[in-house]
Image: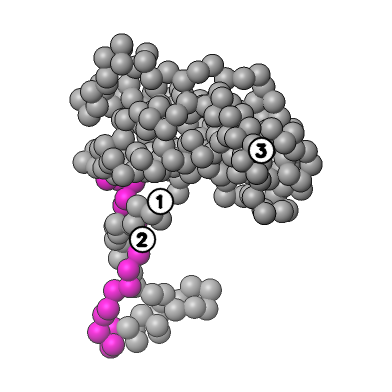
Amino acid sequence: MPFDKRIKDEIISYVTRDIADEEWHKDFFRFISDQKLAARLAEEFISTRCLYKILEGLSVTKWMLRAQVRAQVFSYASIYEAIIHHILFVDFATDSRVIALQRQSGRTDVSIPSAKMELLKKHLTHGGSPIIVTRESIKKIKTSKIRFDKKAECARDIGLIDDALCAELIEFYEARNSIHIHAEIRKSMKYQMDLSWRAYRRMEPFKTQVESALVSQGLFLPFPEKSKKSLKPKPSGPKANLAVP
């Protein structure tokens, strides 16, 4: 059964009190060249913050606090990954370092006449096993198959982010991929809370660094300073469970 109107109004008032509106969150991702992606990132950002505020208002503890942390880490790591992926493979698609990221060396079997193969089997073995003739080849791999740490390091090498931020983003994404019961048992709640707090707090410097790199490459034209000021959110409240406003 849903809450009555009075309770819902109080919850909505509490949640939205210290969080900027949808337009501010859309503007936050104005450096993304794909408008659909930018809109989806804005939705993820504001929804993550609102869900946090609801659970903060409930002063959750123990297993519910763990769920709160899990949701924070998962969402922010996903936002970072989506942005880096898009900028690398769309805005910097022709950069030699991005092209190299999509190449993988390997070996391909070489087909030779059966008579020569029989000679090889007869005279060439290694540890009792026949030697197979192969040639070295370079294959193009799907961008979706490239590991996040490699993409983050490429973003660092291009100049999108600095060394410290690169290391933290990799930490966030590794935590996102290892969010399961056994991993949670090994990690202390204090560490997980700190991780989710940092995942949120790094959003602003991440945006600043990426925007600056795009501007320097002529890939993004920022709004005038006056417009940027008018879009700033209201100050956040005091630190609570995770200290994420």
Q: Which amino acid, by three-letter code, is at mark 3?
A: Ile
Q: Is residue 194 visible?
A: no
Question: Marks 3 and 1, Cα distance to the nearest angstrom?
Answer: 46 Å
Judging by the rendered image, the residue that carries numbered circle 2 is: 106
- Name the residue rendered at 72%, 47% in the picture: 184
Judging by the rendered image, the residue that carries numbered circle 1 is: 146
Judging by the rendered image, the residue that carries numbered circle 3 is: 7
Residue 118 spot, x, y in % from top left: 34, 87
- Name the residue rendered at 54%, 16% in the picture: 235
Is 86 situated above or below 214? below
Instruction: Give the magenta part as a residue range.
Output: 96-116
Q: Secondary structure at mark 3?
A: helix
Q: Which mark is residue 83?
A: none
| Count of marks placed on residues | 3
Is 50 situated above or below 161? below
In front of the other: 137 or 74 = 74
Classify residue 32 as left or right of residue 179: left
Q: Secondary structure at mark 2?
A: strand
- Name the residue rendered at 29%, 74% in the picture: 110
Q: Quarter-wise, where is residue 26 in the image?
A: top left
Q: Of callouts 3 and 1, which one flags the residue occurring earlier in the amino acid sequence? A: 3
Q: Which amino acid, by three-letter code, is at mark 2?
A: Gly
